[in-house]
Image: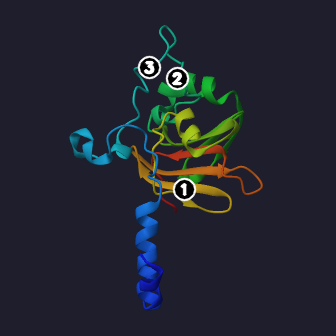
Amino acid sequence: MAPSLLRGMRPRALATVAVVLFVACREPVPSSGGPGPEAAPGGEAAEDRSPVGAAADRAEGDPVAPAEGVLADLHWLGGKREEEAAERIDAWLGPVTGEVDRLTRGREIRHEHGVVRLVGGRIVMVRFDLPEPMTRAEALQATGFPTDATGWRATHREYRLGRRWGFERFRLARAPGGSERVVSVEAWKERPERP
């Protein structure tokens, strides 16, 4: 627009023009390179699909090994029975360091590298302490989830995400000092009712 046209415009119209120009000129948001959510098979959004290859990419001959690039497959653990997942929990989260009975909210088993919450013998929550601070995408990948999540709610201590990939809630604890990086991933398959 020519400067002479801008002089006669009202402030609200000028602001509208500025917003339109800003939106039109900004760089596109980087994508994961795949098709958008609308192209997901089965009518569900891409961010609600199961992660690619969590079980299929396990190392041959080692049923405990997570998929490549995954440190602890929380997606696989969520909802499993304690007996079914015991070997993997020990391999991924380390030895048991303590146990707390949460009454109606289940039993919490603390491990060297995380926590597992059980209700009725089923895993309802897993928290994995990352070996080093990571970005949210890296942390999700390291725990067996897709990396293209949107809709994060940020607080000064954590990032929260609700209802994705068959889980009720995710909490990613932020590294100290207001960092964007996270130090743990907590995934709730279901949330036990409070008494």
Q: Can you say which quadrant of the picture contains the N terminus?
A: bottom left
Element marked by disc 2: loop
Amino acid type at mark 2: Pro
Local packing at callout 3 (Cα closer than 10 Å; few below 14, some 14-19, many 20+) is few
Residue 161 vertical position relative to residue 131 in the rendered view, above or below:
below
The residue singled out by tag 3 in the image is: 57
Local packing at callout 1 (Cα closer than 10 Å; few below 14, some 14-19, many 20+) is some
User: Can you give x and y, in whole percent of width and height, for residue 88 in the image?
Assistant: 55, 24
The residue singled out by tag 1 in the image is: 160
Residue 103 vertical position relative to residue 73 in the rendered view, above or below:
below
Whether tag 3 and tag 2 are in contact, CB under 8 A, the answer is no
85 sits to left or right of 5: right
Q: Residue at x 52, y 31 (%)?
A: 73
Residue 23 vertical position relative to residue 169 in the rendered view, above or below:
below
Element marked by disc 3: loop
Local packing at callout 2 (Cα closer than 10 Å; few below 14, some 14-19, many 20+) is many
The residue singled out by tag 2 in the image is: 66
- In the picture, residue 54 is in which quadrant? top left
The answer to whether residue 110 shows anywhere in this view is: no
Amino acid type at mark 1: Arg
**Of the residues under marks 1 and 3, which one precedes in the sequence?**
3
The answer to whether residue 71 shows anywhere in this view is: yes
User: Can you give x and y, in whole percent of width and height, for residue 184 in the image?
Assistant: 65, 43
**Of the residues under marks 3 and 2, which one precedes in the sequence?**
3
Amino acid type at mark 3: Asp
In this orientation, which residue lies closer to the viewer: 29 or 191?
Answer: 29
